[in-house]
Amino acid sequence: MSKLYYSACVLNVPCFSLTQARVVRAAPNDEVTIQMRAIVLSGLSSAWEAGPRSAAELIEAAAHFERAAALCNAPAVRAHRALLADWFRGLAAGM
């Protein structure tokens, strides 16, 4: 991947989201990858500017948080991810 493409992609949220979706397809059982996808979809990180999230994105983020929780061995982290899944499902339901 060229440096220019990488720079443009990181600054472009739809491009980054698309790239992240490809990573999850390549590693569907990788806990960190799934967690990162959940964060991208939810807009939880302030590392990039992201507009408001749609209900569909929040529901998908919740599913990824739930999947990351299921793959996690640490009870506290698992509980936190399950809480985030519930939170984002609730936000989506309220839209």
Image (tube, rainbow, N blue to C red):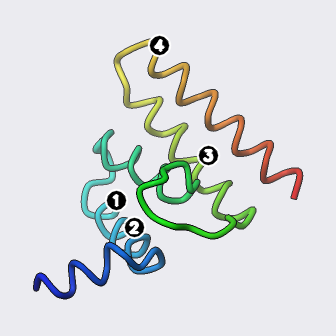
Q: Nearer the viewer, residue 71 or 16?
A: 16
The residue beneath circle 1 is 24
Q: Give yes or no for contact between labels 4 and 2 (Cβ–Cβ under 8 Å).
A: no
* 3D distance between C-alphas at marks 1 and 3: 15 Å
Residue type at mark 4: give it: Ala
Q: Earlier in the sequence, mark 4 or mark 1?
A: 1
Residue type at mark 2: give it: Ala
The residue beneath circle 2 is 21
Position above or below: 54 against 79: below
Q: Position of residue 69 (x, y in %)?
A: 47, 30
What residue occupies the far top of the structure in this picture? 75
How many C-alpha atoms fall within 10 Å of the one at disc 4: few (<14), some, or many (≥20)? few
Q: Quadrant of the C terminus?
A: bottom right
Q: Nearer the viewer, residue 50 or 91?
A: 50
Q: Is residue 80 left or right of residue 33?
A: right
* 3D distance between C-alphas at marks 3 and 4: 17 Å
At mark 2, the secondary structure is: helix
Q: Nearer the viewer, residue 23 or 4?
A: 4
Residue type at mark 1: give it: Val
At mark 3, the secondary structure is: helix
Q: Quadrant of residue 79?
A: top right
How many C-alpha atoms fall within 10 Å of the one at disc 3: few (<14), some, or many (≥20)? many
The residue beneath circle 4 is 76
The residue lying at 43 percent from left, 70 percent from top is: 17
Q: Position of residue 70 (x, y in %)?
A: 46, 29
The residue beneath circle 3 is 62
* 3D distance between C-alphas at marks 4 and 1: 24 Å
* 3D distance between C-alphas at marks 3 and 2: 15 Å
Q: Give yes or no for contact between labels 2 and 1 (Cβ–Cβ under 8 Å).
A: yes
* 3D distance between C-alphas at marks 4 and 2: 26 Å
